[in-house]
Image (cartoon, rainbow, N blue to C red):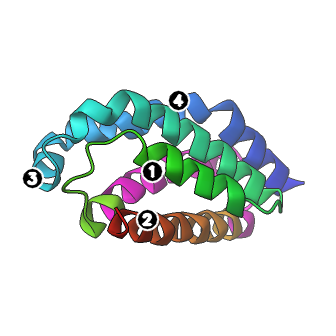
Amino acid sequence: MEEEIVIQKLKIDAQGIANAWYALHVLNTDKIGQLNPYLRSRFGIDRQLCYNLIHIICRYLENNDVGNEIQEWINSSLSVGQLETVSDELVSLRINFLMEVIDNELNSLRENGKVSEPIIWQCRGKITGVLEYVKKEYVEALLKL
């Protein structure tokens, strides 16, 4: 039951999560610019991709097989362009930004007494795992370009 509360929170707040993720990019423009000076032109579409990824994460937390959805998400991301200088470091940084925002959502549920600490850690572990899988598949797809 508590895991369902986490899933609903992430679904309801998906757009806010994507916007907060974007805000972290703006706050770290210098670092990102060093890694890929063209990335800023992708931010609009990347916010939408982030929103879509949150919903994939939710389906994963619901124990759905999301392998095909992840591949479709990667293909959508790769079709945007501006990837000439994308590195493992940049992908990791962007995933860390997303986890930071998701952690804030999870912590608010814990602090409000809606979800217990063990469930927060369980969900966080699952989310981290699926994001690491996305990163691995994404970087592999980039290397094939």
Q: Does residue 114 show up?
A: no
Residue at x-position 36% and y-position 35%: 22
Q: CA distance from mark 2 to mark 1?
A: 20 Å
- Which residue type carries mark 1? Leu
Location of mark 4 (residue): 16
For marks 1 and 4 on the same chain, the one whose residue lies earlier in the sequence: 4
Q: Secondary structure at mark 2?
A: helix
- Frontmost of labels 4 and 3 is 3
For marks 1 and 3 on the same chain, the one whose residue lies earlier in the sequence: 3
Relative to the observer, which residue lies in front, 54 or 75?
Answer: 75
Relative to 55, is 46 on the left or the right?
left
Number of other residues with Cα within 10 Å of mark 3, as a class: few under 14, some 14 to 19, many 20 or more = few
For marks 4 and 2 on the same chain, the one whose residue lies earlier in the sequence: 4
Q: Secondary structure at mark 1?
A: helix
Q: For the magenta stretch, what is the residue range?
A: 92-119
Residue 98 placement (x, y as % from top left): 45, 50
Q: What's the magenta bit mostly, secondary-structure-wise?
A: helix
Quadrant of the rendered image containing residue 144: bottom left
- Frontmost of labels 3 and 2 is 2
Q: Is residue 111 magenta?
A: yes
Q: Secondary structure at mark 4?
A: helix
- Which residue type carries mark 3? Gln
The dot on residue 34 is 3
Location of mark 2 (residue): 141
Q: CA distance from mark 3 to mark 2?
A: 22 Å
Q: Does residue 135 show up?
A: yes
Q: Secondary structure at mark 3?
A: helix
Number of other residues with Cα within 10 Å of mark 1, as a class: few under 14, some 14 to 19, many 20 or more = many
